[in-house]
Amino acid sequence: MRLFFNKVYWFLSYYHNYMINHKNFLIQLVSITIIDFSIRLEEILFESESYITNRGGGCILKKYDYVSIFLFTTLIGLSNYAGASGFALIEQSGSGLGNAFAGSAASAEDASTIFYNPAGMAFLPDNQVVLGMHVINPDINFSSTGSRSGLGFPESGDNGGNTGSLTFLPNFYFAKSITDTIHLGIGVNTPFGLKTEYNDQWVGRYQTVKSEVNSININPSIAYKANDKLSLGFGVSAMRIDADLTSAVDFGTILGSLTSNPLLFQKLDGTTRTKGDDWGFGWNAGVIFQPTDDTRIGLSYRSQIHETLKGTTSFYNVPAPLAASFQNGPVTAKLVTPDSASISIFTKLDEKWDLLGDLSWTDWSKFQNLTIIRTSGTIVSSNSENWHNTLRVSAGANYHVDENLKLKVGVAYDESPVSDLYRTARIPDNDRIWLSFGGQYKLSETSKIDVGYTHIFVKDASLDKTNEIQTASPALTAALQDKLIGNYSSSIDMMSVQFSHSF
């Protein structure tokens, strides 16, 4: 099983790297041809006889076409920046972005409900395929206000530049009706991801230069319609996480302290890089209660997943006298992704208006520290995180202009799990306010396209972080424990497009 998942991930990673190298081309392509693409996709995939087989008056896709659709949606790559707080990604549906994902566990608008609440499949047509794409553009800027070395001198370096980077987040979902009461589905998405990358010579380089986490989640699910008012859903998740962490090493201060030569302090920087990955397994479940034809209430839960990342730590530009103390080698790091729960409501007020709401809880208290250990048992690094649980509340509305066009709006308040005391430069997170707009247009009786835009206002964040590096010498430890002091100003823009086809 793990071998199969590794082969799938190798394929996705190959295309991820390819698309990153051709990002500028993609930006132009998406912005110019997004509508034309959707129409042509519908014509090619769902109207060509070579892609559809008629059996008993119905239409089903051939087996090899499921693979084609899967490959198409994963060509774009994996996400590497968290649009939600922490390093979680709520952006798993192009149809939900316009409402700031309000009502996501109850609306059951399309097959992306597999992620938010698998019970929603019971409200879908017989079969449906969904292809979604998000473009996330974070803007994260640091300003130093007195950062200093462990010896008390001003820390050399700049403010690091814009640490955010444009990224693409794809989603794929397929749901199929087996009987009137049983529906099966599968989702491929990215529940967690982040990337912060500073200039190599920035003032906080000894604490971090690059932090990148990528994930892919394969999520088969089942839904059961117990009666006209109650539906149940359950899914399992196979999720792979890749992590890549780099920082500078102040070999100059180390060598200068050992040789009593202060002229070497901060003059001989090297680099350390730690990479690791692992597969973990979890589950999600949900229930939708429909008291009236116009109102649905959804409850959903997604479990934590335990990962033991295995990889290597490498050191570069190590001075010869220190080579024996800074050797490359295998390492491990334990990571537990949080469990979460949501309660949502969707209600149709009249022929024109829908209202949506959501309250979500995330158990970030599982993330207390990040410790990297050599297989010999020696600790390479250990950093306190001390995250706390969070709530996210959102509200949204839909306005039906006519039978083909629906406009969407939404707002959300998203708590950060990071406190001022324990904020780090790797994840300089803070509370967020979402403002979202979007729309849905029916291309035909069976196909529709959703588009959405969100601006996230991130609260300015202060940073006062002492390097937690430890050595056998108290004097050397003190010399290396530089203090990074300053403030972050951040915001995020997101756009999404999603194509859905029922058959």
Image: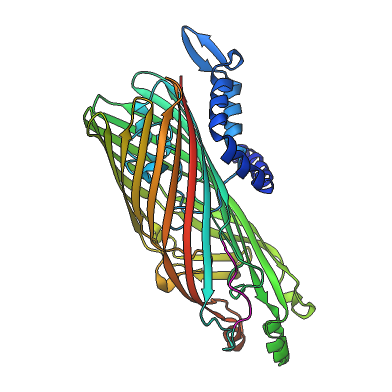
Visible residue check, residue 265: yes
Quick one: which residue is furthest to the bottom in this view? 260
Q: Nearer the viewer, residue 257 or 324?
A: 257
Residue 273 at what x, y percent from top left?
66, 64
Q: Is residue 472 above or below residue 109?
A: below
Visible residue check, residue 87: no
Q: Is residue 25 above or below residue 483?
A: above
Residue 187 at what x, y percent from top left?
48, 35
Q: Is residue 322 left or right of residue 141?
A: right
Question: Residue at the spot x=56%, y=52% of the render?
Answer: 80
In the rendered view of the protein, which quadrant contains the N terminus?
A: top right
Q: How many numbered dots are placed on residues in this image?
A: 0
State how the image is colored.
Answer: rainbow
Q: Is residue 260 left or right of residue 281?
A: right
Question: Residue at the spot x=33%, y=44% of the render?
Answer: 102
Q: Is residue 296 above or below residue 271?
A: above
Magenta span includes 489:
no
Question: Residue at the spot x=24%, y=24% of the render?
Answer: 228
Residue 309 at what x, y percent from top left?
57, 55
- Numbered range of the magenta stretch: 155-163
Q: Nearer the viewer, residue 26 or 170?
A: 26
Q: Quadrant of residue 473?
A: bottom right
Quick one: which residue is furthest to the top in this view? 56
Q: Quadrant of residue 86?
A: bottom left
Our reading of the magenta stretch's main secondary structure is loop
Residue 229 at what x, y percent from top left?
23, 28
